[in-house]
Amino acid sequence: MKKIIFAMLAVILTVLVVSHPHAANASGETIPSFALSTVGGRMGDTVHVELSLADNPGITAFQIQIGYSVKDLELVSIEDKQLFGEAISYGQQDANPYTISWFSSASENMYNNGVLAVLKFRIKNGAESSSITLSYDQENVFNISLTSIPFQTTDGKVIVTSKENKKTEVQKEIGGAVYSVVSGNTVEYIRLAKYNGTKTSIPNEVFIAGTKYKVTSIAANAFSGNEKLKAVTIGKNVKTIGANAFYNCKKLKKIIIPAKVKKIGTKAFANCKKLTKITIKSKKLKNETVGNQAFKGGYSRPTVKTPKKYKNVYKKLLKAKGMSKYALYK
């Protein structure tokens, strides 16, 4: 693939390098990433797994592989989200790992971030929960200068609940949001379904088929790239905020991280340019539980309120995870 890409890109190098000087981001401080989402479902269900791209430094070509358990899952179809304005090339559907590749000469779209594709899997009878792996050969991911780009990757997962469990719907839309059952009495907030306003909230609990479930986690990419969201209230039972959960929410102004939160994923609040006020009630955050670049690229001088005895500890921790060195701690 590299030889083919090289030949095609050589024709357009002169024009594009001049018109897009920020292609140098490929060697900048942030690390671009490909990520697969985590979803839940019962045997026989068809679930939708999102493949997303974040911190794109200007890709003109890539080839990635997606692996999954054929014992547990069947790849039914792929929905191309046209992130780059051009069709993505897909490999043979029954191949495993499954290959997705893309090449473009259209410079205006090469810096786009968001959902690349939605992979639709049917959960087979007798299936168990399993991971969906994401891998790539660095030599097959290029910027306009034909430089190979290193990416970090996040695997996805399909969480299977027994079909005999009649009491619950594994995935359910409630109040404009989609939730997925994680265990007997807990659910994960997956994404917004219909609401397009500027404010939203993640409740403490929800009722599914008459049963109460605590909302204990926010899925990876839950609000990623939401261009309207200004305020969100996170319920008190949330313990985990997934990777890229609020990535690139450029209008988000303030956030309160509840007391039970133990884990904040990679780039969870990265690129939130207007996030001026961050209140952390949790006393459980550690270096190993807060992902890299969790607060990278945010507001230059945010106000950060922490538990009194944790001010100095969190100041050091958050700075290491991308928080501005000019942040004001209280």
Image (cartoon, helix red, strand yellow):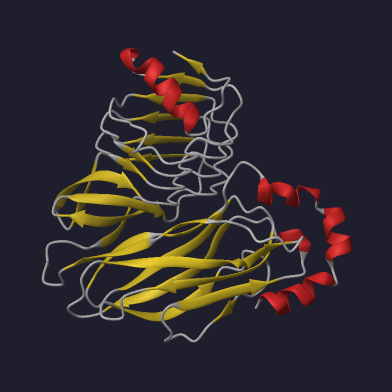
Q: Give how far across and how far down residue 314 sits, in percent.
A: 40, 23
Query: Vertically, is 199 above or below 222?
Result: above
Q: Residue at x 39, y 68 (%)?
A: 48
Question: Where on the picture, by quarter, is residue 89?
Answer: bottom right
Whole-percent x, y for residue 94 in the image: 42, 87
Give the residue at x 65% y 61%: 148
Q: Is residue 176 visible?
A: no
> Closest to the observer: 126 or 29?
29
Instruction: Report the quarter where the C terminus lies.
Output: top left
Q: Is residue 213 left or right of residue 258?
A: left
User: Can residue 96 be seen from the camera position used here?
Assistant: yes
The residue nearer to you, when weighing 119 against 311, is 311
Q: State the residue in front, 57 or 41.
A: 57
Residue at 60% x, 34% y: name it: 273
At 51% from the left and 45% from the top, the residue drawn is 247
4 lies left or right of 325: right
Quadrant of the rendered structure where residue 112 is?
bottom right
Q: Is residue 169 left or right of residue 289?
A: left
**Vertical comparison of 107 with 304: above or below:** below
